């Protein structure tokens, strides 16, 4: 979260005229050398007059120190990519810190000055195991009532009555790839490629809260059904309409909040099974205090302000659950709209609904996931559902919330490092789908 604010803080824009391509390359190389030497004050000297005024030297130095505090020292610099568009020259510089990687994007003006400086995520890279493979792609639209969501049907090279998996997002506004403008990874795109390699089609679509973000703001009656479930049910029905797909082998894979919602999706549609990937057992709001405590404690200490913040979230959980609390409204975890949303979740028990389903269920997650901890969530599902014959469990060793492997404890920083799920993990998921 701190890192995101710094990135926004450093986002300076634009200009009208540009220096020559060669002069701009020389200037970029000089700035890169200064970054490597931690001489941010001298970097500031390259800014044009307007940028210097809006972004003072002291703030640039403090921001750079903050980035290094959270991500470690600058380890190396990748190959710089240069581009020209109309009246501007742009350099994209990959910066690899000890714990994360970003692109530094510079834009120059005609006076050999920097008029734009910002940080972005590294570009997404196709997994090595998916390169040079043949896939079928079809643009689709998931239409629920007045909402129309653009998406994609990805097909294996040969699909004749092949199974299909609907990919359902986690919390927050997400695109069809469950990617972010701040990270280089796209979990759903990787899963779609992996399933296709294993003979399974997928449907991905942009989330309603992304496409209709403005229209949905301030709606007091908004619930998980409106956010996720309704559109997933529509996607299931859409999958069944394609004659080349096996209508008896439609599956839902929900990630994080989507996993939590998937029993309700299955309850309202006709699916062969659901894969609950990194899904919590408890309502989202009950996990938030633990996430705050983990994130704020990464530096090894909690300030009085941070401790008070954590305690406030705990009291807000009590308030949502209509228990005795020191607070009478939400402040840290949202507003009155979120109170209605959270209290709707409080009436839902995913394990109880799973018991009522007549489809197959796979509960799975990584043992290195800090967002949804297997010690509290996965184990709870196991304890309650271990005797249900239609439910399987798979705890994946060494992977985080995005199914990316690592040996160290997971932290937010690793989300900024390019990575992909192991093809072996996807093969397991595909094998479960194909094993009827």
Image (cartoon, rainbow, N blue to C red):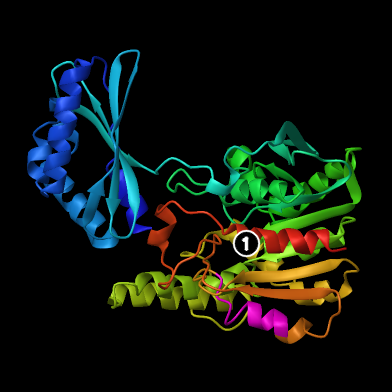
Q: Quadrant of residue 170?
A: bottom right
Residue 327 seen anywhere in this rendered image of the structure: no
Q: Looking at the picture, how far across and down is residue 280, in whole percent?
A: 63, 71
Where 121 sits versus 287, above or below? above
- As drawn, is 297 to the left or to the right of 311? left
Tell me which segment is drawn in magenta: 372-382
Which type of secondary structure does the marked residue at label 1 adopt?
A: helix
Q: Is residue 380 magenta?
A: yes
Q: Which residue is mark 1?
A: 424
Q: Is residue 333 magenta?
A: no
Q: Looking at the picture, how far across and down is residue 167, in whole percent?
A: 70, 51
Q: Looking at the picture, how far across and down is residue 220, in whole percent?
A: 65, 53
- As drawn, is 36 to the left or to the right of 265? left
- As drawn, is 231 to the left or to the right of 281? right
- Which residue is located at x 37 percent, y 76 percent? 308
In this view of the protein, which residue sits in the foreground, 227 or 372? 372
């Amino acid at each position: 979260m701190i890192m995101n604010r710094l990135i926004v803080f450093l986002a300076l824009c634009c200009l009208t005229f540009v220096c020559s391509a060669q002069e701009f390359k020389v200037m970029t190389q000089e700035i890169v050398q200064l970054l490597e030497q931690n001489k941010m004050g001298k970097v500031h000297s390259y800014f044009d007059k307007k940028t210097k005024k809006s972004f003072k030297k002291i703030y640039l130095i403090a921001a750079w120190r903050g980035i290094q505090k959270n991500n470690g020292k600058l380890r190396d610099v990748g190959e710089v990519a240069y581009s020209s568009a109309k009246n501007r020259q742009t350099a994209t510089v990959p910066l690899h810190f000890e714990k994360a990687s970003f692109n530094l994007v510079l834009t120059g003006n005609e006076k050999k000055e920097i008029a734009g400086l910002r940080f972005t995520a590294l570009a997404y890279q196709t997994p090595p195991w998916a390169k040079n493979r043949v896939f079928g792609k079809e643009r689709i639209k998931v239409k629920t009532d007045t909402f129309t969501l653009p998406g994609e049907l990805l097909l294996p090279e040969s699909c004749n009555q092949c199974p299909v998996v609907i990919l359902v997002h986690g919390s927050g506004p997400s695109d069809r790839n469950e990617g972010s403008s701040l990270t280089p990874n796209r979990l759903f795109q990787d899963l779609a490629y992996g399933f296709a390699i294993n003979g399974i089609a997928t449907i991905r679509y942009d989330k309603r809260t992304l496409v209709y973000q403005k229209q949905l703001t301030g709606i007091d009656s908004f619930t998980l059904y409106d956010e996720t479930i309704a559109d997933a049910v529509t996607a299931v029905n859409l999958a069944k309409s394609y004659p080349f797909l096996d209508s008896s082998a439609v599956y839902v894979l929900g990630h994080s909040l989507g996993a939590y919602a998937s029993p309700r999706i299955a309850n309202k549609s006709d699916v062969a099974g659901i894969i609950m990937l990194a899904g919590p057992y408890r309502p989202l709001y009950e996990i938030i205090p633990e996430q705050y405590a983990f994130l704020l404690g990464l530096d090894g200490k909690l300030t009085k302000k941070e401790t008070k913040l954590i305690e406030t979230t705990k009291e807000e959980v009590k308030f949502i659950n209509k228990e005795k609390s020191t607070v009478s409204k939400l402040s840290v975890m949202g507003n009155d709209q979120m109170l209605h949303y959270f209290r709707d979740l409080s009436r839902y028990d995913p394990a109880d609904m799973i018991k009522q389903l007549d489809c197959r269920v796979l509960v799975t997650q990584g043992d290195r996931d800090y967002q949804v901890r297997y010690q509290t969530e996965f184990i709870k599902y196991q304890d309650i559902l271990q005797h249900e014959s239609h439910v399987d469990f798979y705890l994946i060793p060494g992977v985080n919330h995005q199914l990316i492997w690592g040996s160290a404890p997971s932290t937010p920083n690793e989300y900024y490092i390019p990575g992909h799920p192991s093809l072996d993990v996807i093969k397991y998921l595909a094998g479960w789908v194909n094993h009827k």
